[in-house]
Image: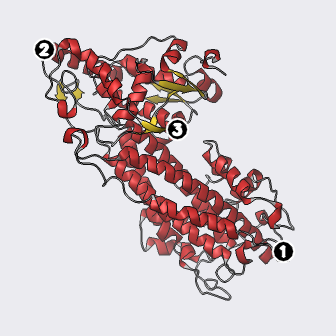
Amino acid sequence: MPYEELLVPETGSRVEDDLGLTVEINGTGLTIADACRVSHGLAAVKMTSDSAVEKGVLDSRAVLEEALDAGEVIYGVNTGFGGMANVIMSREDQNEVQNNMLWVHKAGVGKKLPAADVRAAMLLRANSHLRGASAIRLELIRRIEIFLNANITPIVPELGSIGASGDLVPLCYIAGCVTGHDANFMVECDGVEMPAKSALQRLGLEPLPLLPKESLAMLNGTSMMTGIAMNCVKDAQDLLTLALYIHALMYQGLNGNTLPLHPFIHQSKPHAGQIAVAEKMTKLLEGSSLVRQSQGGSDRNAAQGLVQDRYSLRCIPQYLGPIVDGLSEIARQIEVEMNSTTDNPLVDPESRGIYYGGNFLGEYVGVTMDRLRYLLGLAAKHMDVQIGMLMEPHFSNGLPPCLIGNGERRINMGLKALQIAGNSIMPLIQFLGNSLADRYPTHAEQHNQNINSQGFGSANLARQSIDLFRQYMSISLLFAVQSVDQRAHAMYGSYSAGKFLSSRTLPLYEAFREIASRPANENRPLLWNDYEQTLDTMVAKVTEDLKDPLSSILAAANEVAVF
């Protein structure tokens, strides 16, 4: 459909009417969960009606205007930028400086960023400005609110920021779109691309030229990298929770002993994450007929084979605990960044002071996203070991080699090739765990940005790592479901594992089978003969579901909350 025929709904009507959810922003208290609802179009956004917040925004602008009227020299307002801060601008040139800044920084390259990441950045920029230290007009903040609720998303390239003076280049595209700048910025609405000025016309809005300081306030901040990071953190929380559920299924497939989860062990080494993982694994395995339930009495030893399970089962709390703790700390730091003023200079309406500083430096984002990718690599490695255990009868407590379904058909090879596919992904996730924040150019922008965070690049790498990890979780889930079917048959003569699983892992088992269009069968496991299905199709269906903010797989793995 050409964009001329597109009907843009009234502000917020689609989101509010369909979902009934609204997230109010006031500069503080915005959570990752609520912000992600807005970024994925699952909630409308509303600027607070708190008069104190509005007064702070208006007063900060007034302080700046008074300083200009008094003839003060203020960086980025009546001076050049960065290494050209010694260039003084006349009052007549001050507005043109703001306009020129958008021309100069429309320099991004590469593919376009996902709409959810751009929407996240818009939300965070508005939230930052509502803190009342940016000397920006309320009207400009309202423009962002209008665009979000009308589902109009600026098209922003994925390359162009070193995360030092904020995300100058990516945020330029947001500023250019909401103001209708002359440099031909583009937006997307319901999959249709159009010039930003056309979108403004359909919203009944005029272009909004920027006043002194406003382009600097819009571009000079960490909102783009933080928006990407915020979405990555939420995805990582969901996927690591899913990983714990998959471990619980594999625990059952491997006929593991629950003794290593006993509270006495973890109270003896009381790391918060370790204790939490042990408690949650205990809940996930409660009532299962496929594990060896042990509380340390006479049942503590296996009847045959190893007295205790191998490390990948026995040390799940000790291994995943630091990952859970690490991601929790990352989430806290990103939420602080989400609720911060990150431009420069900052204006204090109470003291009437104007302060030069460096809140635009995205070091917290760069370091946390480096750490996030590293933690995903650890989690993938652990899952890779569990899959390796499942594939070999000597390590799986007697499951068929390669989890072959019909062993009578001698040419069946089961999941041999799918394991190789997983093996190809896991090293990539680990490779992406290498740090980026320490690899910055020292000469950037006339040596002004001679330290820089690489937060934007690190966050983009985190998004790639999340995509790979999502694929890997889909593969792992297939292994887990096949293994519990075969364990059920080995112990009880039925391939329909649902009757023997713990009650808390059953919904995940059923959700997977529904997405794979393979109902449970007493006489056959998930996979029987090789030629009866294509594995790539099954994995692709699960991966697509996991990309959906309303994923049925994730919904089935949320009773035992990890984060």
Q: How was this image coloured?
A: secondary structure
Picture quadrant where residue 338 is located? top left
Q: Callout 2: 10 Å neighbours few (<14), some, many (20+)? A: few
Q: Position of residue 74 (x, y in %)?
A: 17, 24
Q: Callout 3: 10 Å neighbours few (<14), some, many (20+)? A: some
Identity, as a three-letter code, of the amino acid under mark 2: Ala
Please give the residue where the numbered disc 3 appears in the rendered image.
Answer: 114
Near-viewer residue (34 or 293):
34
Identity, as a three-letter code, of the amino acid under mark 3: Pro
Please give the residue where the numbered disc 1 appears in the rendered image.
Answer: 493
* 1 and 3 marks in contact (CB < 8 Å): no
* 2 and 3 marks in contact (CB < 8 Å): no
Gap in Å between the C-alphas at discs 1 and 3? Answer: 48 Å
In this view, the mark in front (1 or 3): 3
Q: Position of residue 219 (x, y in %)?
A: 34, 30
Quarter containing the N terminus: top right
Is residue 26 among the parts visible in the rendering?
Answer: no
Q: Is residue 122 above or below residue 329?
A: above
Near-viewer residue (270 or 457):
457
Identify the residue at horizontal 50%, vertical 60% (top origin): 429
Identify the residue at horizontal 67%, vertical 59% (top origin): 504
Q: Is residue 459 above or below residue 20?
A: below
Q: Is residue 212 left or right of 416 when viewed as pictured?
A: left
Q: Is residue 457 above or below residue 122?
A: below
Please give the residue where the numbered disc 2 appears in the rendered image.
Answer: 70
Residue 357, labelled with which disc?
none
Choose the circle earlier in sequence order: 1 or 3.
3
Q: Secondary structure at mark 1?
A: loop
Gap in Å between the C-alphas at discs 2 and 1? Answer: 88 Å
Choose the circle earlier in sequence order: 2 or 3.
2
